[in-house]
Image (cartoon, helix red, strand yellow):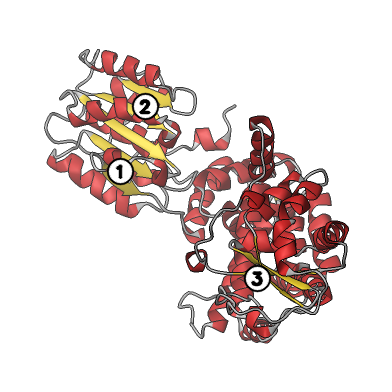
Amino acid sequence: MAVFYLKYRPQKFSDIVGQEHVVKTLLSQLETGKIGHGYLFAGPRGTGKTSAARIFAKAVNCQKYHMPKFGEPCNRCKSCLSVAAGSHLDLIEIDAASNRLIEDVRDLREKIKLSPVSSRFKVYIIDEAHMLTREAFNALLKTLEEPPKHAIFILATTEPSKLPSTIISRVQRFNFQRAKDEELAMALRKIIKEEGIKIDDEAIFAIAKAADGSFRDAVSFLDQLSASSKKVTKDDIKSLALVSDWNLLFGFLESVVENNLKDAVLTVEKLWQEKADVSAFIKEVILLLEDVLFIKLSIEKSDSDLDNTQLEKLRALAQKTTDSKVRDLIKLFLVAEGESKQYNLAHIPVVLAICKYCLSDVDQNEQTETVNETPAVPKAEIVKEELVEVLPKKAAPSKSSVSFTHIQKNWSDFLQKVRPHNTHLTAILRATRPFQLEGSDLICEVFYRFHKEKLEEIKTIRLLEEIMEEVMGKKIKLKFVLVKKADQAPKPVRSSDVVDIDSKELEKIAQEIFLK
């Protein structure tokens, strides 16, 4: 017995759910005979792209019509029946994920020259077209530029942005969209009536909502539920694809916004243990976050289905956060929702997203404490969000017994002592310039922010100061100041600044820099 999504696959344009704008244009072209040689059907999965391509192939070869005008396929002639059975010799379906190489497209180009076996047109449906390689696209381009009169290409893809603009410009593009819940519910009722399934009306809408606009997903959910239950209820949906009540969604979101890490993580863990669809749950949370963002931006949604109580709760929650934090949380959950579909442990990306958001403030506090532990730098030398001015060229008189000239002369010895501990640090210090000595503080100029951050790490600065004391014979504190590269004054190269490095050692230092 065929599964529902195959048994009830659309067989004519009027069967396609939620794509009236596409159907209307395609039927208009068929009825006027102004059909193109290349089409691009783009949109989310399960929205009818491949089905529409097959119906179009039936229509142009339907024996009911005579060129140049066509219409809805009759589904009774030999040609229509063979397309439905998958045995039509002039309908060639290619899975680009498996036939993505240039050799596959070259083979197609050779065969396309041959006339149709028994029909008016040879129709090529290339599914998941974005999977073709760049070389394969280039080979296909020539065929799309000068196609045989008997050939029609239909490219179907869920990611049109990955197709070259040269390909897109040579085909007619049709954007398929997610069907509305009401449209899916109507389609489901037809199947329910045909199959005699007992189901609550609430459960029908719950399935439609869980399908997220995909006809195929909605029918598959119905098929699975009807096989495991004599009467399908709304509660049965939660074990298959979570369509949680609003209070559960809000409770979870409130825990995240209030940095209640434990409750938020345990909610996700519980959903996972109950075999719920974590991806569907996070998708609903993202939509709820969108409502919060709209409240923060003082924008009213025209299609909002929130009641007054829910709206008041969201407004109260919106007061507890900022619009930038809401945006950050939406981004984190969008990434987590996508990753959850790729792994067997679907809840882990969501848990990581929650931890990243809730612990971000803690991390910032720790970084602040670390910075506070670092010896203070004069205000004129502090670097915040922008580069500082170059320090005055007149150095204050040093009270230290170690002169700045002495440090310059022994700088290469200092670098040699650092190298056994960390060659990466040595390479960074070679791009750092001692500038002046103020008391026991040695001010060094750094020209790259990431160099400064590395040198100011507590472990690093302790190590460098210990080595500096060993080389110079006196305790010297290191201060690093970020300056503009352009402001670096020309400096003559002295023999004391040059350190001989053999080629193998130079290669090792380069690897330390770029591979860490």
Give the structural element (helix, strand or loop) at label 1.
helix
Q: Out of 79 and 350, give the one closest to the viewer.
A: 350
Q: Position of residue 406 (x, y in %)?
A: 74, 63
Q: Nearer the viewer, mark 1 or mark 3?
A: 3
Which quarter of the picture shows residue 60?
top left
Between marks 2 and 1, how big is the CA–CA gap? 14 Å
Quadrant including the N terminus: top right
Give the structural element (helix, strand or loop) at label 3.
strand
Quadrant including the C terminus: top right
Within 10 Å of the Cα at label 1, are there few (<14), some (14-19), or many (20+) other Cα atoms? few
Give the structural element (helix, strand or loop) at label 2.
helix
Is residue 74 at all visible to an observer of this figure? no
Q: Amino acid at mark 1?
A: Ser
Q: Out of 276 and 375, give the one closest to the viewer.
A: 375
Q: Position of residue 72 (x, y in %)?
A: 26, 38
Picture disc at residue 165: 1
Between marks 2 and 3, how big is the CA–CA gap? 50 Å
Please say if the residues under marks 2 and 3 sit with CB atoms less than 8 Å apart: no
Q: What's the residue at 19%, 47% (across, down)?
A: 28
Q: Which residue is mark 3?
A: 481
Which of pointers 1 and 3 lies earlier in the amino acid sequence? 1
Q: What's the residue at 62%, 49% (across, down)?
A: 495
Query: How many numbered discs?
Result: 3
Q: Position of residue 213 (x, y in %)?
A: 51, 54
Within 10 Å of the Cα at label 3, are there few (<14), some (14-19), or many (20+) other Cα atoms? many
Q: Out of 327 and 153, give the one closest to the viewer.
A: 327
Q: Amino acid at mark 3?
A: Val
Which of pointers 2 and 1 lies earlier in the amino acid sequence? 2
Q: Out of 339 and 370, give the one closest to the viewer.
A: 370
